[in-house]
Image (tube, grey):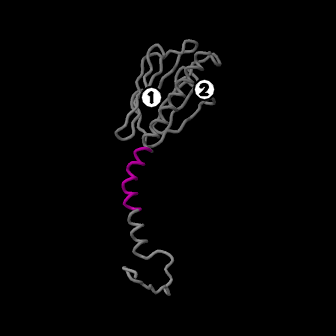
Amino acid sequence: MNLLGTFHVNTTVNERGFTLTELLLSVALFFIIASFLFPISLHVLRTHTLYETTENLLHVLRRAQSMSLTGMNNNSYGVKVHPDSYVLFEGDSYESRRIVSDEVYPLPSSVAITGFDEVVFTALSGTPADAHLLSLSVNEREETIEISALGLITR
């Protein structure tokens, strides 16, 4: 004898697929998880943008210094920072530069730059006229680039 008994379930109704309740629960769960992940992913994106912009600017500064050290075209090279871009230029100043040799690099609108707006590396020595400090920031995060009077470029 079977203690649990025998149950017979009517299976004439199609039981494949999801019910509306299951679908609504899944969508609600998705939006709850997304609401927690959105601020985290936004923070990661901003941090990456700041890091990438700092690395690119460091590269351009070191490239300008390297071009000055080698005496390329018997000229000095420098970098000019604008609110929306920065420019690697050839010449003793941005105002007296050779415009045809300008290399313009875009600056993300989320990155704010404070500090110097122009640095020129002397031909054959690669040293700037003065020490410079540049700060890049996105919201609460900040990166600093320092150029010593001896020409050492550090982060």
Residue 7 vs residue 9, the one in the foreground: 7
Residue 22 location in percent, x, y? 41, 72
- Verify CB contact (< 8 Å) between mark 1 and mark 2: no
Per the rendering, the mark at residue 75 is: none
Residue 130 location in percent, x, y? 43, 16
Main SS, magenta region, reads helix
Q: Which of the two labelled residues, at mark 1 and mark 2, occupies the earlier sequence position?
A: 2
- What span is colored magenta in the figure? 30-44
- For the C terminus, the quadrant is top left
Tell me if 121 is positioned left or right of 23 in this view.
right
Per the rendering, the mark at residue 98 is: 2
Of all residues shown, which one is farthest toward the front? 1
Mark 1 highlights which residue? 117
Q: For numbered disc 2, what is the local secondary structure?
A: loop
Mark 1 Cα-neighbour bin, 10 Å: few <14, some 14–19, many ≥20: some
- For the N terminus, the quadrant is bottom left
Of all residues shown, which one is farthest toward the left? 140
Residue at point 39% right, 40% down?
138
Give the vertical position of 96 relative to 26 (above or below). above
Residue 35 lies in quadrant: bottom left
Is-magenta flag for residue 37?
yes
Task: Give the amino acid type for the residue marked by disc 2 in the picture.
Answer: Arg
Residue 60 location in percent, x, y? 54, 28
Front: mark 1 or 2:
1
Residue 127 vs residue 42, the one in the foreground: 42
Task: Give the amino acid type for the residue marked by disc 1 in the picture.
Answer: Asp
Is-magenta flag for residue 35?
yes
